[in-house]
Image: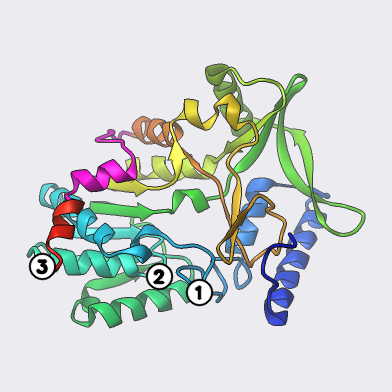
Amino acid sequence: MNNLPIPAPEALAHSQRLHQAIADEIAAQGGWISFARFMELVLYAPGLGYYAAGARKFGAAGDFVTSPEMTPLFGQALARQVAQVMSESAPVVLEVGAGSGRLAADLLLALERSKQLPERYFILDLSADLRQRQQQTIADAAPHLLSRVEWLDRLPETFSGVVVANELLDAMPAHVVAWHEHGIFDRGVAMDAAGSFSWNERPATGALLAAAEEIGMQCSLPPGFESEISLAVRAWAAEWGHRLERGALLLIDYGFPRREFYHQQRGRGTLMCHYRHHAHPDPFYLPGLQDVTVHVDFTAVIAAAHAAGLDLLGYTNQGQFLLNCGVLDCLAEIP
């Protein structure tokens, strides 16, 4: 990783504290944890994980840039779809994982211009640091609308309106799985003799094994194929079948339908890390200082949601979606 920026001493010390906390958990669990658990810890460990600590993540000063950070046109176009769903359900928006708050500000301003403001704009984000940044972003861009925004600590028991999740699912913990001639294995994390994290395989069991067997049969995976399965994403999608009364989920993320996700040419999966605008594949590098993501198996999302009683209303790529939402009209309206 010689080409990556060197962290400041205090950032490096923070990473070392998280490294030790994860090492302690591995020891407590008998020398091994699943990669899903490792990913959960490096991203969300209280006070230490990437999204749970205070480092800046989004924009030019962070590690990556999301679509709302690049242009307000994203939120302006999305607002048209949000307004349509609200008109068929309830004038309420729930954004899950709101990042810097840029999308929330842009959506609120666009909906105000079209006289379709929601009565409430809920934000669910587990990071206290990001909540503060979201509040500041909205206060700076739309101070008169801040009173409509409310932060939640958990999913509501029931909900009617629009659920927006932009680049949320790719940050949910995922297992890394290997399909071998002699069985299917859960690629987890152990410690090597030098005290560093290392890959270590154990036979897959339970729900993970069932999911991997189904994928292996559907996609005819060759021996040695490695990829990811997110049971957390499936569970999250299914949960809305019990909570959503009227409305729709707008899920915007990196991913593929199953046969593309598990294509034989993608034999090492989609796991990717982002540190200071550099992308690389090593999830063990500087825990707590880098983002760790996997792409989304949209077939699994749709199947889990459908089994819970939801219907698929549309599936397309982001470019086509924004065109359908009138992004060119939004561009033409710029003075």
Point out which mark residue 61 bears: 1
Q: Earlier in the sequence, mark 2 or mark 3?
A: 2
* Residue drawn at (83%, 58%) of the image: 196
Magenta span includes 310 = yes
Specify whether 260 is left or right of 82.
right
Q: Which residues are the magenta region?
A: 309-326
Identified by mark 2, the residue type is: Ser
| Residue at the farthest left position | 115
Q: Determine the CA span between mark 2 and mark 3.
A: 22 Å
- On the image, the x and y values in percent for residue 23 come to 79, 60
Residue at x-position 51% and y-position 43%: 295
Which marked residue is nearer to the observer: mark 3 or mark 1? 1
Residue count near mark 2 (Cα–Cα under 10 Å), binned few <14, some 14–19, many ≥20: many
Is 147 placed above or below 238 here?
below
Residue tagged 2: 100
Residue contact at pointers 3 and 1, CB within 8 angstroms: no
* Residue at the image point whose x is 40% and y is 42% from the top: 237
Q: Is 62 located above or below residue 23 in the figure?
A: below
Q: Where residue 236 sits: x, y (%)?
A: 44, 46
Task: Provide the residue designation for mark 3.
Answer: 113
- Give the foreground label among 2 and 1: 1
Of the numbered discs 2 and 1, the one sitting upstream in the chain is: 1
Which secondary structure lies at badge 1? Answer: loop
The residue depicted at 67 percent of the width and 76 percent of the height is 11
Colour pattern: rainbow
The answer to whether residue 28 shows anywhere in this view is yes
Residue type, label 1: Ala
